[in-house]
């Protein structure tokens, strides 16, 4: 939740300042938060809430309190604070978004999904809510809904949502739409030279296309991409596994096992390799 609080702090400087005492308490809480002393930030914010319970922006104070509590790992208290903030102002989507993220972190996914959807009712183009909804549905293997929210997110900002675009390719692949996934990935790879995110993550992008080509049984093309991926990041365990899988699905268990064992030595998840290792001596 570190990123969450930093975002809130930046936005807080735009709020109006009130009486001198309220202003002093408010600024103290922000200064402590900037110094990562969230315990003191929480204490000061509680004083602010106690001393100014009828302030017109009291909901902002409750939201900040939740953020400071969350940064200390006090998610249950944070939930109460975010809920109080939204109760005081049911148009304040920031508190609702923060509560959704807290539910997500507590793995209360049903509640998180409800809140994210309510955020979108208030702010149709809320990119954080759209992205997290897509991720949660993908985590649940509900790829149909995951695709819906990734596509909505990309439609909001097609030139700046490449993480969502890469994830959408994976979702299409998992639904069996290999042609669609390959077409989308080809377009993304064409943009690697001009896009910072894709350039920095090109090893991952090439691995993903190799995986799609492997599933299409286009093994020679898959090998070309996986070699590009590993040339960029020789220690990339996922790509090492993919290379082993390409050999494996061609029936070359000898070479496959070489790469599975390398991946195993580098800490690859046991459950990822168990189905293959039975063919390795």
Image (tube, rainbow, N blue to C red):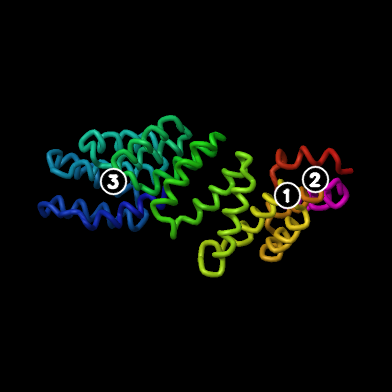
Return the residue at label 3: 64
Return the residue at label 2: 249
Determine whether, in the image, residue 52 is placed left or right of residue 39.
left
- CB under 8 Å between discs 1 and 2: yes
Compare residues 242 and 27 and report the one nearer the observer: 242
- Residue at the far top: name it: 110
- CB under 8 Å between discs 3 and 2: no
Residue under the point 39% across and 49% down = 127
The mark that comes first in sequence, 1 or 2, is 1
Determine whether, in the image, residue 35 is placed left or right of residue 132.
left
Q: Residues under labels 1 and 2: Cα distance?
A: 8 Å
Return the residue at label 1: 214
Q: Where on the picture, by quarter, is residue 32?
A: bottom left
Q: Residues under labels 3 and 2: Cα distance?
A: 53 Å
- CB under 8 Å between discs 1 and 3: no
Determine whether, in the image, residue 121 is placed left or right of residue 153.
left
Residue under the point 45% across and 42% down = 149
The mark that comes first in sequence, 3 or 2, is 3
- Tag in front: 1 or 3: 1
Q: Is residue 148 magenta?
A: no
User: Can you say which quadrant of the picture contains the C terminus?
Assistant: top right
The mark that comes first in sequence, 1 or 3, is 3
Circle 1 SS class: helix
Give coordinates of residue 154: x percent, y percent: 44, 51
Compare residues 196 and 274 and report the one nearer the observer: 196
Give coordinates of residue 200: x percent, y percent: 56, 64
């Amino acid at each position: 939740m570190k990123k969450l609080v930093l975002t809130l702090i930046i936005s807080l400087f735009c709020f109006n300042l009130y009486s001198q005492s309220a202003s002093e308490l408010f600024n103290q809480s922000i200064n402590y938060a900037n110094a990562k002393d969230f315990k003191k930030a929480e204490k000061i914010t509680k004083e602010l809430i106690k001393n100014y319970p009828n302030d017109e922006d009291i909901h902002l104070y409750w939201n900040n309190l939740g953020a400071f509590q969350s940064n200390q790992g006090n998610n249950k208290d944070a939930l109460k604070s975010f809920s109080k903030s939204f109760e005081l102002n049911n148009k304040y989507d920031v508190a609702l978004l923060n509560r959704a993220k807290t539910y997500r972190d507590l793995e209360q996914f049903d509640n998180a999904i409800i809140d994210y959807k309510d955020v979108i009712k208030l702010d149709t183009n809320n990119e954080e809510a759209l992205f997290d909804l897509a991720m949660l549905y993908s985590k649940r293997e509900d790829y149909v809904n995951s695709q819906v929210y990734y596509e909505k997110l990309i439609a909001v900002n097609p030139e700046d949502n490449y993480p969502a675009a890469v994830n959408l390719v994976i979702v299409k692949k998992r639904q069996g739409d290999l042609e669609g996934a390959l077409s989308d990935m080809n377009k993304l790879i064409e943009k690697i030279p001009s896009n910072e995110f894709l350039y920095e993550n090109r090893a991952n992008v090439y691995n993903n296309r190799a995986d799609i080509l492997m599933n299409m049984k286009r093994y020679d093309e898959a090998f070309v991409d996986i070699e590009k991926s590993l040339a960029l990041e020789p220690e990339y365990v996922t790509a090492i596994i993919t290379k082993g899988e390409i050999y494996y699905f061609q029936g070359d268990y000898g070479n496959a096992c070489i790469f599975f064992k390398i991946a195993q030595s580098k800490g690859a998840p046991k459950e990822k390799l168990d189905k293959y290792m039975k063919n390795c001596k």
